[in-house]
């Protein structure tokens, strides 16, 4: 497994630095947000798998020719008191680092989920006191707020869209439909799960450029995906005007006690600004500007051949490290 560990290490470095930088500067993601979203997920998963896998493979190299055989040998040492003389200091260090990193990633993912769920629960309690059901749309609450505000609060069967009466007064019927369609797209496509995963990833590894760039890209891409859903029923001019109206009120907050991590706002999708990995007001304005620019100067959709090529790259990114870890002697 000598070459396998080094190949995985090189792949992990590439996916942690040059690849996300190049992708974040590319122009094509706006032409196919769903394809770009899959690629970012593949980069994140393959990068984490390669990072942990490289340390595991190096640490298990003396006792197995692949990951499974090595883990069996390690289990024998731990549970059957077999001799550990084959493992040197650096092998034990690599195994310890892999175990600690894996535990850190899982713990951060669960902790982020707990924090978000707590914020959403608190948010629902406030809505129950300060908001009233909308007479114009199902599963929609209206808060008394002069600024134009629109966001969704995920929660399975309890998911709701929240609007301010200031927004409803400012929007024409078509613009209101565009806002509701946009927010419903966030809920139906479960964008909150992507935000949770990438927020946790950035919080766990804030020093990696991948985590910051990926979270910023995902925030922007899910807005584009929701805009595309709204465009199926409303015109571009209507959607652009709705975006501009909501963005004009973004500086004043999102309602009484609203926790940003508990929702995805029409003007921006962002993690809790009090946590590492959050995108603040500047990031929200950049996302809004990108959305409006995309609508004002539409580009042709990404060609089918290029989409298939990106999908093939996603599959290869996930399959390559998996095969290297499992297949004996694949790289010698």
Image (cartoon, rainbow, N blue to C red):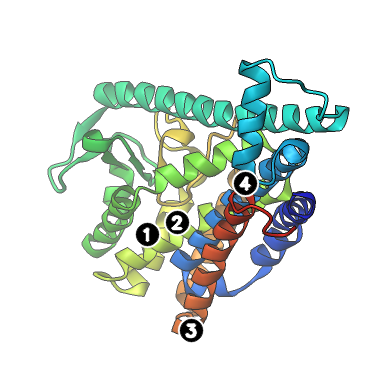
Q: Which residue is mark 2?
A: 222
Q: Are marks 2 and 4 in contact (CB under 8 Å)?
A: no
Q: Is residue 278 in view?
A: no
Q: Residue 11's x, y, as percent?
A: 72, 56
Residue at 78%, 23% in the rendered image: 84
126 relative to 118 in the view: left or right: left
Q: Residue 138's x, y, as percent?
A: 15, 44
Q: Which residue is mark 3?
A: 305
Mark 3–mark 1 Cα distance, whole angstroms, equals 24 Å
Q: Are marks 3 and 4 in contact (CB under 8 Å)?
A: no
Mark 3–mark 4 Cα distance, whole angstroms, equals 28 Å
Badge 4: residue crowd in 10 Å (few <14, some 14–19, many ≥20): some
Badge 3: residue crowd in 10 Å (few <14, some 14–19, many ≥20): few
Q: Give the label, 1 or 4, closer to the camera.
A: 4
First reached walking from the N terminus: tag 3 or tag 1: 1
Label 4 residue SS? helix
Label 1 residue SS? helix
Q: Which residue is mark 1?
A: 226
Q: Residue 259's x, y, as percent?
A: 45, 30
The disc placed on residue 2 is none
First reached walking from the N terminus: tag 3 or tag 4: 4
Q: Which residue is mark 4?
A: 49
35 relative to 152 in the view: left or right: right
């Amino acid at each position: 497994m000598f070459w396998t560990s080094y190949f995985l290490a090189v792949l992990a470095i590439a996916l942690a630095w040059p690849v996300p930088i190049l992708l974040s500067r590319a122009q094509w993601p706006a032409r196919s947000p769903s394809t770009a979203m899959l690629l970012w997920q593949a980069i994140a998963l393959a990068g984490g798998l390669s990072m942990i896998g490289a340390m595991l493979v190096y640490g298990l190299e003396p006792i197995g020719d692949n990951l499974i055989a090595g883990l069996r040998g390690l289990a024998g040492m731990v549970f059957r008191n077999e001799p550990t003389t084959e493992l040197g200091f650096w092998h034990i260090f690599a195994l310890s680092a892999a175990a600690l990193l894996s535990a850190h990633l899982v713990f951060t993912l669960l902790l982020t989920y707990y924090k978000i769920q707590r914020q959403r629960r608190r948010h629902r309690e406030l809505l129950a006191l300060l908001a009233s059901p909308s007479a114009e749309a199902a599963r929609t609450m209206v808060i008394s707020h002069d600024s134009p505000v629109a966001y969704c609060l995920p929660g399975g069967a309890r998911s709701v869209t929240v609007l301010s009466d200031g927004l409803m007064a400012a929007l024409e019927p078509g613009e209101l439909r565009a806002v509701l369609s946009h927010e419903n797209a966030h809920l139906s496509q479960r964008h909150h799960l992507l935000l949770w995963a990438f927020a946790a990833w950035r919080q766990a590894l804030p020093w990696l450029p991948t985590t910051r760039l990926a979270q910023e890209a995902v925030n922007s891409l899910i807005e584009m995906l929701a805009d595309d859903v709204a465009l199926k029923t409303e015109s571009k001019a209507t959607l652009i005007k709705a975006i501009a109206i909501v963005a004009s009120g973004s500086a004043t907050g999102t309602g009484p006690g609203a926790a940003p991590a508990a929702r995805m706002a029409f003007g921006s999708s962002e993690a809790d600004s009090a946590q590492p990995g959050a995108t603040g007001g500047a990031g929200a304005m950049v996302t809004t500007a990108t959305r409006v620019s995309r609508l004002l100067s539409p580009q042709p959709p990404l060609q089918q051949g290029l989409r298939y090529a990106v999908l093939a790259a996603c599959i290869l990114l996930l399959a390559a490290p998996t095969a290297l870890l499992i297949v004996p002697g694949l790289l010698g």
